[in-house]
Amino acid sequence: MDSPRIIHRQIECRWEKLLQAIDALPLPDEAPIVNEACDMAFKTGMIFSPEFFRESFFPGYARLCKALHDKGKKVSFHSDGNLMAVMDDLVEAGIDLLHPVEPLAGMDPAELHRRYPDLILLGTIDVSQLLPNGAPQEIADQVVRNIEATEGRIMVGSSTEVNNEVPLTNYLAMHQAITEYRY
């Protein structure tokens, strides 16, 4: 807070190093998607203000997305939490996929698809309540709802890491619903 210019410069140096690496290194054809992870939100909102991210993060991130697109790669962005305050910025920067899409954080797959129909969503099945506590049929029904709400532009999975609180039967119910459903 005392030296925002130092923070902004450190972030800019990070982008410069990443862009140099993208330019210098061959990116294998076997990896069509590059993931950039930057947790920037809590379930209740952004860690820092959207203005901070617009000033320090998104200009460099847009350059990164362009460099990857120029090399024929898709860009997946990972951040837990409620990103709605910066979703326009993320899409404008060039993301192709969004992970993990936490419903209990306010990240509604249907609303995201309505607003950003070309964006592919990853996750969307709540791992904090539904997967550990729901009935297998509830989980299967949510899988189908999310696929249909996104018109199939989804890679269904848990909203974050599957943990020991998730019964195997519930995980298998999610897996079975995913593999059996045809959009």
Image (cartoon, helix red, strand yellow):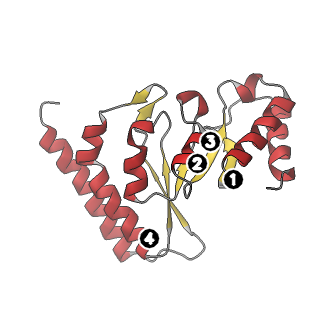
**Disc 2 and disc 3: Cα gap in Å?**
5 Å
Q: Is 115 or 126 nearer to us in this picture?
A: 115
**Disc 4 and disc 1: Cα gap in Å?**
24 Å
**Mark 4 or mark 1, earlier in chain:** 4
Name, please, the residue furthest toward the front: 114
**Disc 1 and disc 2: Cα gap in Å?**
8 Å
The residue wearing badge 2 is 113
The residue wearing badge 1 is 151
**Mark 4 or mark 2, earlier in chain:** 4
The residue wearing badge 3 is 110
- Looking at the image, do the residues carrying marks 1 and 2 touch, with CB atoms under 8 Å apart? yes
Amino acid on which disc 3 is placed: Ala
Amino acid on which disc 1 is placed: Glu
Name the spot of residue 18 as percent of width and height, x first: 34, 62
Which numbered tag is attached to residue 69? 4
Q: Residue at x 78, y 43 (%)?
A: 144
Q: Quadrant of residue 66?
A: bottom left
Q: Is 102 or 18 nearer to us in this picture?
A: 102
**Disc 4 and disc 2: Cα gap in Å?**
22 Å
Amino acid on which disc 2 is placed: His
